[in-house]
Amino acid sequence: MDDWHFDTRSVHAGRNQGPLQDPNEPRPDGLGTPVVPGIQPSSAYYFDSLDSLDRAFDDPTKGFVYARHGGQTGGLFGEAIADLEGADGAVAFSSGMAAVHAALLASEPSKPRGILASRDLYGATQALLTNLFAPQGIPIRLVDTTELGAVRDALGEGPRLLYVETISNPLMRLADLAVLADLAHGAGAHLIVDNTFASPYLCRPIEHGADAVVHSATKYLGGHGDLTAGVVAAQADLLPALGLVSRLVGGTLGAFDAWLALRGLRTLSLRLERQCANALALARALRDHPRIARVHYPGLGDHAQHALARRLFADRGFSGMLSFELAGAEVRQVRAFMDALNLLLPAPTMGDVYSLALYPAQASHRGLSPEQRAALGIGDNLVRISCGIESPDDIIADVLQALDAAR
Ligand code: PLP
């Protein structure tokens, strides 16, 4: 299995019946082995002897004990993501934010060794840092991580970790992961990467030197808009702390969503291939449109980080996400554009098989003032699109007719 290509592994990862069952052993009841794993919702597990229970309490690889500590179906999803991200292990969580929180805590930030993070972060992650971590006395510093000199300087203050997103939301800026990993490690810090926008199909940050990778599995990993989940894949030194946070804070992934997430993985490569192709087609259709001032998409040759995108994504695509600015548009016209969409759903999520449109000023970045948004480069005329797997012709036609309608 180890030498299978990514596309093959995503179809089969986590297929075994559980981390504790040897797939080479015949099933005890003599029945055939199911093609798909079961859903195991049990909140507790019992053992033949207290000795066995003791061993399982002491070492999670010896057995599941209690669902908050991790259950069989969530364990399979974690195994699958560890495999796909090339990590030593992974812990599944009940949401992307639970995963982000656990990954941050696992690096043990404290005073004076706090958190250095990209200033281009998903809004809730930024709010987590400033509203929950900072008031506990943990120093938080935000930098433009495309400015490597600024990152180097800030690392000089000795943070425990550097936290970045592979592709930033909504401006599609990329993190040069290999360089950032070197800088972070040189300063004795972990590099933790939110890989939600890229998915392991496009980029596997551990291969570039990251210590841990976070996903909102609600997005591309699940892919169908029908589950809420998160996961952290990490190298061995961070796994015990991640397990501890999971057990004590309790944001553990339930069996039903874990099973849906596993099923989503089976089509990850196919979905991403189509979503990336659709986004590139839409970006090209909008690039020279008179109503569009600018398209943010790393697949366009004139994107400032196009060469980095080719390196980072190994020519598998350039993301299924893009954003664009409506030329000279007031808030009223952007709202009219959003309301005129027929196919694209104006829902505050991304990464689904359905195409989605989002108005960052009203949704992901509504907590920021217009001045704060402007400082980040997020104007009130910016729209974000998550391309689904529909026909590219229908996606483009819908966006073009909505542009016409929004005068
Ligand atoms: N990270 C990124 C980049 C996201 O876009 C999101 C949600 O949109 C999250 C984390 C949080 O994920 P969830 O909504 O599953 O908690």
Image (tube, grey):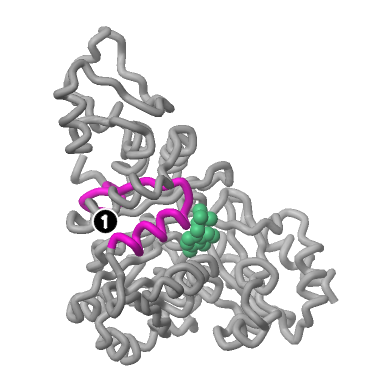
Query: Is 362 drawn above or below residue 146 in the view shown?
Result: above
Q: Is residue 360 magenta?
A: no
Residue 393 visible in image: no
In this view, the residue in front, 333 or 277, is: 333
In this view, the residue in front, 89 or 172, is: 89
Query: Is 102 drawn above or below residue 380 in the view shown?
Result: above
Q: Secondary structure at mark 1?
A: strand
Dividing the picture into quadrants, the one containing residue 379 is bottom right
Residue 329 image offset from top left, x and y in percent:
76, 82
Instruction: Give the residue drawn at x 24%, y 48%.
Output: 89
Query: Is 368 drawn above or below residue 77 in the view shown?
Result: below
Q: Quadrant of the N terminus?
A: top left
Dividing the picture into quadrants, the one containing residue 52 is top left
Q: Is 338 placed left or right of 375 in the picture?
A: right
Residue 310 image offset from top left, x and y in percent:
36, 72
Q: Provide the residue designation for mark 1.
A: 234
Label 1 is placed on what type of residue? Ala
Q: Is residue 102 magenta?
A: yes
Instruction: Give the residue drawn at x 43%, y 38%.
Output: 258
Residue 323 image offset from top left, x and y in percent:
60, 72
Query: What are the residue bounds of the magenta stretch?
Result: 82-106
Instruction: Give the residue drawn at x 22%, y 34%.
Output: 57
Query: Magenta region, mostly helix, strand or loop?
Result: helix
Work out which residue is located at the far front of the displayed protein and give it. 136
Work out which residue is located at the far top of the displayed protein and give it. 30
Q: Is 372 placed left or right of 33 in the picture?
A: right
Residue 267 visible in image: yes
| Number of marks drawn | 1
Dividing the picture into quadrants, the one containing residue 399 is bottom right
Q: Is 30 placed left or right of 407 in the picture?
A: left
Q: Is 167 placed left or right of 360 in the picture?
A: left
